[in-house]
Image (cartoon, coloured by chain):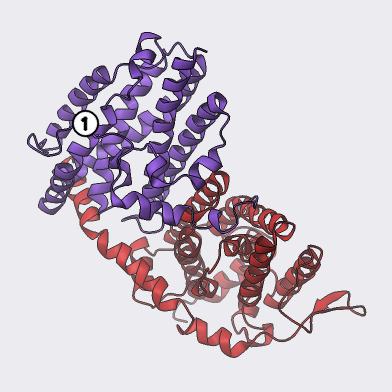
Amino acid sequence: MDDPTYDTRLAEFETRIARGEKIEPGDWMPDAYRKQLIRMISQHANSEVVGMLPEGAWITRAPNLRRKMVLLAKVQDEAGHGQYLYHAAETLGISRDEMIDALLEGRAKYASVFNYPTLGWADVAAIGWLVDGAAIMNQTMLAHCSYGPYSRAMVRICAEEGFHKKQGQEMIIRYSQGTPAQKQMAQEAIDRWWWPALMMFGPHDSDSPNTPQLMRWGIKTRTNDELRQEFLDELVPGIQALGLSVPDPEMHYDEATGHWVGREIDWDEFWRVIKGDGPMNASRLAARRKAHEDGRWVREAAAAYAQAMG
Amino acid sequence: MDAAVRDALSARLLAMADDELVLAHRNSEWTGHAPILEEDIAFTNMALDELGHASIWYGLYGELTGEDADRLIFFRNAGQYRNAQLVELPRGDWAFSMVRQYLFDAAEYVTLNHLKASSYSPLAEAAAKIATEESYHLRHTGLWLRRLGLGTEESHGRAQAALNVLWPYARQLFVPLPNDDVLVEAGIFPAAGLLLNEWTSMTRSHLADCGLTVPEEALPRRDVDRAEHTEHLMALLAVMQSVARLDPEAEW
């Protein structure tokens, strides 16, 4: 390092984190900390924006007025989370336009789970219970993270995500006790979303090169495998109690450890989808690009009007 | 309540509910596809408000007729819907959706102002509740019309093209229903002619401020009945009702 005080500053920074202090936008931070946070927060913001698509497609088809209103409110929340997270990332010196360009040009990632299709109404329910359920576990951890703006964003977002999960769970419960067609719909949705939800926690700790540094700097406070295990232990009995099953014949309760254990995730699929070759990667990006292109003249008009009005 | 009044009022309430429902459907098609993230939030919120209003009007209709909102929404065919054609047209571009929403918001605004004084107190109470949301909608879409009308050459052209199509359709919002005179006499619902006058002076003045020209010669100039629909409503309902009709006995 050229900066002779770097080591001292780094030591002070790490001491603050060890004391549980929050790092705020104007504070000194190592470049790697800033970069990791920009990567994580912008990826998170992009996920909220892309995440509007799979469920948004069902707003017009929701089967009663109440479900339609709940789903509209939920997808609106996601847009709000995206906005809130873009703001949080902007405190680190990147603009929303840069983040959106990176998304549209395929340089930035978003949650891989949204690269799977929603093929039935109950998929909306499974997304709420499994996908939002998994997201909450990750986000509850991030609510304790060392960067103030991200931590505060997570506190607020988790409160709304709790409602998202609940409405999904409530639907699966109802359909599991409903007509044969509803029960089948619920089972198919669980089958479709089970593995993508487990993949949301990321690679095994042993394959997650960023984790040790992220933990030392208080960005992550728990590992991928710990969170995934907590998810299994909550969801497997929850799903089985409804007379539904998870699509994993090896799933069993391990008496010795007190944990639910199933087969390995298909890691080839995991990496394939991350690298762009999932069932919906092209379609999701195409939808975002189209909205962006179609909206260009609108943004230009709004800017021209604002300028003319001074 | 007198049977003639009840029938006239329920016909009016169903028309109001169907307008809100179908417009909310079209607006919700923008969710996730809006030109800026702030509009994914705002326009979705407006769709949500409209569904809320639809729910209120279907509820009042149900109190008079005993019919259930979800049965009405998901199990009527296009010919049984009583929305104006204005709201069933495909969403078009952002200018089309904004101009339509503005024309509709202005109509709702002038109507609610009168309904607050309706002699039918459930209607008056609902109108008072909704009016606050509606004045927010009108501010929002009124400002978008300024941006589009006065923004760039392209936005002006698109807004004007949308207005040329939509203006004659908006007229249908003010075509009296066959038994409206009973409601006017009872002080329940204002005369359509009165609403049309208020709406016309309000929208003409704002459109002029936005640099937009009302298409005086646009067709149709006849009164279109609310039982008459375009082909678009059937396609819209085929989507909206697809899940509910998979299993008509199911509770969702």
The picture places residue B248, in percent across and down from the top left corner, at 59, 52
**Chain A takes which shade in the image?**
red
Q: Residue furthest right?
A: A256
Q: Is residue A254 left or right of residue B164?
A: right
The picture quadrant where one finds residue A187 is bottom right
Placement of the C terminus of chain A among the 4 image quadrants: top left
Q: Mark 1 — on which chain does it sit?
A: B
Report the front residue among B203 and B11: B11
Report the front residue among B249 and A132: B249
Q: Is residue B37 visible?
A: no
The picture places residue B114, in percent across and down from the top left corner, at 36, 16
Q: Is residue B38 left or right of residue A254?
A: left
- Picture layout, residue B117 above or below residue A140: above
What's the amino acid at mark 1? Asp
Q: Is residue B99 left or right of residue A263?
A: left
**Residue shown at 8% from the left, 34% from the top:** B216
Q: Is residue B87 visible?
A: yes
**Residue shown at 23% from the left, 23% from the top:** B196
Report the front residue among B176 and A72: B176
**Chain B takes which shade in the image?**
purple
Q: Residues within 10 Å of mark 1 (few under 14, many from 20)?
A: few
Report the front residue among A260 and B128: B128
Q: Residue furthest left?
A: B217
Mark 1 lies on a secondary structure that is: loop
The picture places residue B8, in percent across and down from the top left corner, at 41, 21
Q: Is residue A141 left or right of residue B245?
A: right
What residue would you read off at disc 1? B223
**Residue shown at 36% from the left, 38% from the top:** B83
- Picture layout, residue B146 above or below residue A113: above
The picture places residue B116, in percent across and down from the top left corner, at 42, 16
